[in-house]
Image (cartoon, rainbow, N blue to C red):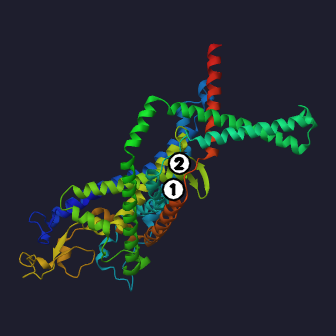
């Protein structure tokens, strides 16, 4: 969310109409602005890395170390619990220290033979401390991008379908009748088996005995499911839910319109990402050697809209905030739908009223890391021209003397938009790149491996979005009966525990 402010501040130093710096915008003043923004960015990046690599792991282990019985007996104190959580967190602190040391002692990149970096040479870092921090930032951003390309496209593709389709209702007669029919069939089959043995299951064959045991377990599950459905139906019949349902019916056309608009926006984002990826793949001067940085960006729909709207601040800020919110919303939907996984193994599931504290902590860490991947994607892929120079322009006219600035007052056709690599030296004097793009270009140029991984990950983003979008259109929504049975079982256990506590208190 700091990017539009960053772009607005660096763009305020130039006159877009004349393509030259304003009188007050001396190089010293511009350096003060960029330095202040750099401090803010580095502070936020450091806090993000500290939260994900130290803060959340400590909170996770702090919760895991809690023992209710030991606390009641006085065997576990806050100090012991703190030390136990810190002991496990030390492993993550060691990882951070190792990453900083690797970045500190990693060889400093120089302009390669056959790959003259030209304009981008200014991004090569010679300060060892900044080099180490850039390595840590690149590492964390790469992890965040791996999560970003997995969860965010899934959520973005599912969002329109969630708004366009009606949610599955427990008042659906098909579900009620199906459960009742299964229960009747189950009980009838049990009566048949019990009739064979006269009520003595020991007389049954091993096969029939196993079937009878299975039927008994299935009957309990169906009874729990039926009870849960009845409870949900009673909740749906309350006046508050009734009013909510009527309001949903009234606003359904707007919901459909919103779903259609989300689909169009998602498609525009997909096209913009694809255009920039193809542009980088074909026109990057040094390819994977410099993280696929571009000398000059071509037309991009999202970037074009943001640049045009930046003429009236804060229009571009509002549009940018809506895009970022859409990405974050899609990420949340993706995490909730897919769950917290390691490869194909589901570790935790995010469910209403049934989410464990560990799952909430891990979901927080995932979303925090996703914001770093989203930051790279928006700045370098989605809207590179806007994120780098915004509406800045330069006067492509030779000055009368070396001390004067070129004047395009009478040559407006020579006022051109700034780009990373311009043929005129006037561009270097007039154009100031945003601090966000400068930091991310430093990551890509000083550590090309990170730049290449971050670039190629977006192909996976585009592929996952298409697959999920097609699947959401083709497949109809279904009720997860297994999840329903688990909810019913948990509800029954909670009611039994509550009754046990009440009887214990009465005693």
Q: Residue 457 in the image: state x and y as whole percent.
A: 47, 67
The quarter of the displayed image where residue 262 is located:
bottom left
* For residue 54, side relative to residue 393 (left or right): right
Label 1, residues with CA under 10 Å away: few <14, some 14-19, many ≥20:
few
The quarter of the displayed image where residue 104 is located:
bottom left
For image coordinates 18% across by 62% down, the residue present is 311
Q: Residue 270 in the image: state x and y as whole percent.
A: 40, 66
Question: Who comes first in sequence, dot 2 or dot 1?
Answer: 2
- Specify the quadrant that holds the N terminus: bottom left
Q: Residue 229 in the image: state x and y as whole percent.
A: 60, 36
Q: Is residue 143 above or below residue 428?
A: above
For the residue pair 69 and 458, the one nearer the viewer reads as 458
For image coordinates 37% across by 77% down, the residue present is 279
Q: Residue furthest bottom?
A: 114
Q: Is residue 57 above or below residue 95?
A: above
For image coordinates 49% across by 58% down, the residue present is 154
Q: Can residue 254 be seen in the rendering of this structure?
A: yes
Q: Is residue 337 above or below residue 420?
A: above
For the residue pair 450 and 188, the one nearer the viewer reads as 188
Q: Residue furthest right?
A: 203
- Give the structural element (helix, strand or loop) at label 1: helix
Q: Residue 85 in the image: state x and y as whole percent.
A: 54, 41
Which numbered tag is attached to residue 95? 1
* For residue 366, side relative to residue 387 (left or right): right
- Give the structural element (helix, strand or loop) at label 2: helix
Q: Can residue 368 be seen in the rendering of this structure?
A: no
- Specify the quadrant that holds the C terminus: top right
Q: Return the residue at label 2.
A: 90
Label 2, residues with CA under 10 Å away: few <14, some 14-19, many ≥20:
some
Q: CA distance from mark 2 to mark 1?
A: 9 Å
The mark total stands at 2
For the residue pair 431 and 336, the one nearer the viewer reads as 336
């Amino acid at each position: 969310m700091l990017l539009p402010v960053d772009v607005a501040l660096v763009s305020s130093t130039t006159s877009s109409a004349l393509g030259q710096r304003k009188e007050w915008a001396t190089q010293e003043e511009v350096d003060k602005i960029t330095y202040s923004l750099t401090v803010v960015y580095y502070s936020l990046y450091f806090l993000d890395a500290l939260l994900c690599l130290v803060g959340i792991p400590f909170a996770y282990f702090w919760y895991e170390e809690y023992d209710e019985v030991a606390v009641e007996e006085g065997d576990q104190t806050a100090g012991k619990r703190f030390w136990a959580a810190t002991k496990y967190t030390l492993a993550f602190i060691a990882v951070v220290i190792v990453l900083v040391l690797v970045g500190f002692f990693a060889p400093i990149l120089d302009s390669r033979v056959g790959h003259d970096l030209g304009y981008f040479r200014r991004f090569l870092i010679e300060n060892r401390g900044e080099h180490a921090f850039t390595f840590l930032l690149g590492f964390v951003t790469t992890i965040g991008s791996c999560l970003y390309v997995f969860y965010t496209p899934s959520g973005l593709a599912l969002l329109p379908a969630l708004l366009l389709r009606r949610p599955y209702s427990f008042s659906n007669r098909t579900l009620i009748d199906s459960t009742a029919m299964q229960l009747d069939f189950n009980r009838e089959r049990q009566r048949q088996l019990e009739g064979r043995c006269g009520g003595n299951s020991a007389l049954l064959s091993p096969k029939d005995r196993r079937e009878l045991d299975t039927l008994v377990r299935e009957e309990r599950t169906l009874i729990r499911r039926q009870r849960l459905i009845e409870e949900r139906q009673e909740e749906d019949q309350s006046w508050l839910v009734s009013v909510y349902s009527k309001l949903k019916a009234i606003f359904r056309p707007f919901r459909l319109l919103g779903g259609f608009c989300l689909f169009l926006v998602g498609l525009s984002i997909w096209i913009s990402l694809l255009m920039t990826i193809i542009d980088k793949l074909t026109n990057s001067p040094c390819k994977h050697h410099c993280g696929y940085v571009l000398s000059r960006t071509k037309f991009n729909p999202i970037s074009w809209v943001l640049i045009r709207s930046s003429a009236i601040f804060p229009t571009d800020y509002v549009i940018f905030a809506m895009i970022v919110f859409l990405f974050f919303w899609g990420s949340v939907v993706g995490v909730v739908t897919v769950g917290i996984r390691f490869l194909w193994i589901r570790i935790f599931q995010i469910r209403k009223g049934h989410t464990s504290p560990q799952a909430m902590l891990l979901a927080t860490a995932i979303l925090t890391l996703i914001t770093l991947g989203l930051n790279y994607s928006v700045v370098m892929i989605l809207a590179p021209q806007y994120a780098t120079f915004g509406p800045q322009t330069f006067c492509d006219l030779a000055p009368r003397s070396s001390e004067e600035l070129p004047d395009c007052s009478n040559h407006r056709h020579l006022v051109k938009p700034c780009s990373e690599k311009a043929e005129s030296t006037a561009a270097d004097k007039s154009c100031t790149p945003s601090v966000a793009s400068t930091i991310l270009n430093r990551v890509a140029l000083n550590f090309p491996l990170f730049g290449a991984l971050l670039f190629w990950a977006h192909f996976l983003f585009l592929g996952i979005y298409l697959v999920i979008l097609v699947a959401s259109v083709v497949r109809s929504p279904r009720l997860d009966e297994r999840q329903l049975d688990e909810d019913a079982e948990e509800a029954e256990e909670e009611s039994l525990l509550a009754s046990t506590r009440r009887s214990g208190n009465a005693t």
